[in-house]
Every structure is written in C-alpha cells, then in structure tokens.
Image (cartoon, helix red, strand yellow):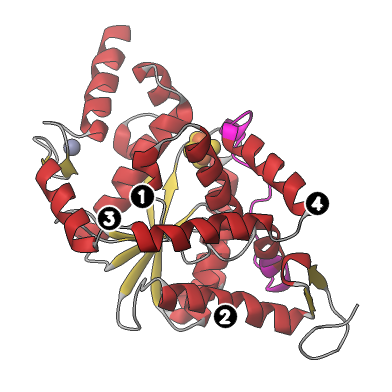
C-alpha cells in the first residue's frame, strides 16, 4: 500500500476517502482538514485568543497540538475532576504536554481542581446531589470553561469533539427526536449573549481512529483509557453501532453528520434571530451572574444542594 500523495510506503489507509498516507502526508491531511473546518465554519482568525478544553485524551491534546503548529494563539484549560485512579494520570499527561510542547509556542495551561474549588471530587458531589456522575461533571465543566473563557477574555473556546463523537450524538438526538439539541449541534456556536463564550469543534472532520494516528505519529503522549465513569454510556453504544456501519460501508459517519450540517445550513434561522431568541430567554444568575434561563443557574443550584446535603450528613 503506497501513499496516495507521494507514492512512498503508506502507514495508514483511509477507506472513507479511498486513500492511504505516509506519516508526513497523513499529518498534513489532518492539519488541512482542521484548517478547512476553521475557515469553512468561521471559527476564529489569526488574532483571536483560543481556550482549548483539554482532558489528557488523544483528541484534545491533538487539537492543542494542531492549533499551535498552525500558528494559532491557543492556551488550554484542564479540569481536574478528582476521579480516583484516573484524574492524576490524565493531569500528568496534560502537564507534560504543556511543558514539553505548548511552552515552546508561548502557550499556557490553566488548571481548575474540582476538589479545591467545589469542596469535593466529582463522585462525592454527584452522590450529594443525587445526580449521575456524568451529568454533574457536564454541569461543572460547562460552567468552568465558560467562566474561564469569559473572565480571561478569550475570543473562543475549542473542544476536541471528533467526527465519531458528533455522529454518535446526532444519532442519539435523532433516536429521541431531541430537536432542541439538534439546533445546537453545529461545529460553531456563536457567543449569542453577553456572558457566553463562542464554542467551536475544529476536529469534526476527523475520526477517532485518525486522531489516534495523528497523536501516535506526532509523539503525543495521551491517556489511552476512557474515563471509568463512561462505562455503559449510551454514547459508547451509538459509536459501536456506527463503527459496524462504517466497516460495511466506509464514509457512513461523515455522510451522516456532514449531510446533517448541509441540511441544517439551509434550514437554520439567521444567527441574529437565534441570538435574539437566546437573549429573550436568558438573564444573569442571581448568585454568579452567568447567563441562565432560571433565577439561579444549574451550577449554583447544584452547589447549594451539595452544601446543604454535606452539612446535613456531618
Ligand atoms: Fe465526565 Fe462522565 Fe466524561 Fe468522565 S465520562 S469525563 S465523568 S462526563
Ligand atoms: Zn450561577
């Protein structure tokens, strides 16, 4: 098998593109796909300050790496969830990458430790508020990333969601006809109201397998294990189903998700009318001031419940 571009020995085949690449041509392909996504979806420009949400996994570290090598001004935020046997390892991967790679590009790593700031690790917090761990984690991460991006004047927040993540999420949203989520499933979500950072997913054109290959070929040391809390999640099931389809019919995932994006682009109300709709629904949280549809935002409500439950159990 030879590289489709330069005809030397290929190291990876991409059946969905009917192509194969050697290591340097594959790295170029991955960077080109990301650069296309950034431009096509109007994610950010050369002068913008970007905050990358990193977890220690292949996708978010590959994203930080690609953005820095493409010459963007990208810092990162890591949220230490305090998961025994997992968070310490993932944090170490992020800190090492920041030290070995990001620093030479003038980029910095911010760290938020749930145990220090919220008074308990994610597992204990979710027990206190009687919510699934992943729901608690989602609320905390969304809140902390948005807070850091807004308070520290980043223009945009970038996450490492890949094609597999987005196709699986789309499948889940369609199976349950969650139309309100479908509206929000685009790779660029504008900062529709004051207090909400713009959010982008520059890796939506690259698959999980391609990102693992990018990380290995570029010597990015990442945590291979999934977060132990993900076990049994519906998302993993949807990914398995889509992988079966992809094996039988290469290109299924990208036809499914990119096809949805094309249809959505034609049907979507203008960004300004979406912003007006959001503006009408949102106002500052009575405690923290972040935008919310209720009196108090879900993060502050959750923290108040955890505090009460913690005091009662003592
Ligand atoms: Fe958070 Fe759940 Fe993802 Fe783990 S699997 S990082 S707990 S959302
Ligand atoms: Zn709040």
Residue named by callout 3: 148
Residue 36 visible in the current orientation: yes
**Residue closest to the far bottom:** 6
Q: Is residue 241 magenta?
A: no
Q: Which mark is residue 184?
A: 1
Measured in 3D between alpha carbons, the distance from the residue under mark 1 to the one under mark 3, in whole angstroms, is 21 Å
Q: Residue at x 40, y 57 (%)?
A: 264
* For residue 266, above or below residue 183: below
Q: Secondary structure at mark 1?
A: loop
Q: Which residue is mark 4?
A: 248
In the image, residue 120 lies at what x, y percent?
Answer: 38, 29
Quarter location, residue 187: bottom left
User: Upstream in the sequence, badge 3 or badge 4?
Assistant: 3
What is the distance, in whole Å, between disc 3 and disc 4 at their CAs? 43 Å
Which numbered marker is on residue 32? 2
Residue depth check, mark 2 versus mark 4: number of the one nearer the observer:
4
Q: Is residue 270 above or below residue 22?
A: above
Crowdedness of circle 3 by 10 Å Cα count: few (<14), some, many (20+)?
some
Near-viewer residue (42 or 158) = 42
Viewer-side label of 2, 3? 2
Question: Which of disc 1 and disc 2 is earlier in sequence?
Answer: 2
Relative to 278, is 241 above or below? above
Mark 3 vs mark 4: in front = 4
């Amino acid at each position: 098998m030879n590289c489709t571009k330069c005809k030397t020995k290929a190291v990876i085949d991409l059946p969905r593109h009917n192509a194969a690449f050697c290591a340097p041509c594959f790295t170029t392909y991955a960077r080109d796909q990301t650069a296309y996504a950034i431009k096509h979806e109007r994610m950010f420009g050369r002068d913008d300050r970007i905050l990358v949400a990193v977890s220690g996994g292949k996708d978010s570290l590959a994203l930080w790496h690609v953005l820095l090598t493409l010459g963007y001004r990208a810092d990162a935020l890591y949220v230490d969830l305090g998961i025994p046997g997992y968070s310490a390892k993932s944090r170490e991967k992020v800190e090492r990458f920041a030290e070995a790679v990001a620093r030479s590009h003038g980029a910095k790593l911010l760290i938020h430790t749930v145990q220090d700031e919220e008074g308990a690790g994610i597992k204990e917090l979710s027990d206190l508020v009687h919510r699934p761990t992943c729901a608690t984690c989602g609320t905390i991460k969304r809140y902390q990333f948005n807070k850091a991006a807004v308070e520290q004047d980043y223009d945009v927040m970038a996450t490492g969601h890949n094609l597999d993540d987005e196709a699986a999420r789309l499948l889940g949203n369609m199976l349950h006809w969650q139309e309100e989520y479908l509206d929000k499933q685009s790779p660029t979500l504008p900062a529709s109201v004051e207090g909400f950072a713009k959010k982008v997913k520059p890796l939506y054109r690259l698959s999980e397998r391609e990102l693992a290959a990018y990380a290995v070929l570029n010597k990015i040391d990442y945590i291979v294990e999934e977060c132990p809390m993900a076990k049994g999640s519906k998302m993993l099931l949807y990914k398995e189903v889509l992988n079966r389809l992809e094996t039988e019919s290469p290109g299924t995932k990208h036809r499914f998700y990119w096809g949805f994006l094309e249809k959505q682009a034609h049907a979507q109300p203008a960004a300004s009318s979406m912003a007006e709709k959001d503006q009408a629904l949102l106002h500052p949280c009575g405690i923290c001031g972040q935008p919310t549809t209720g009196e108090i935002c879900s993060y502050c409500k959750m923290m108040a419940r955890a505090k009460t439950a913690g005091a009662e159990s003592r």
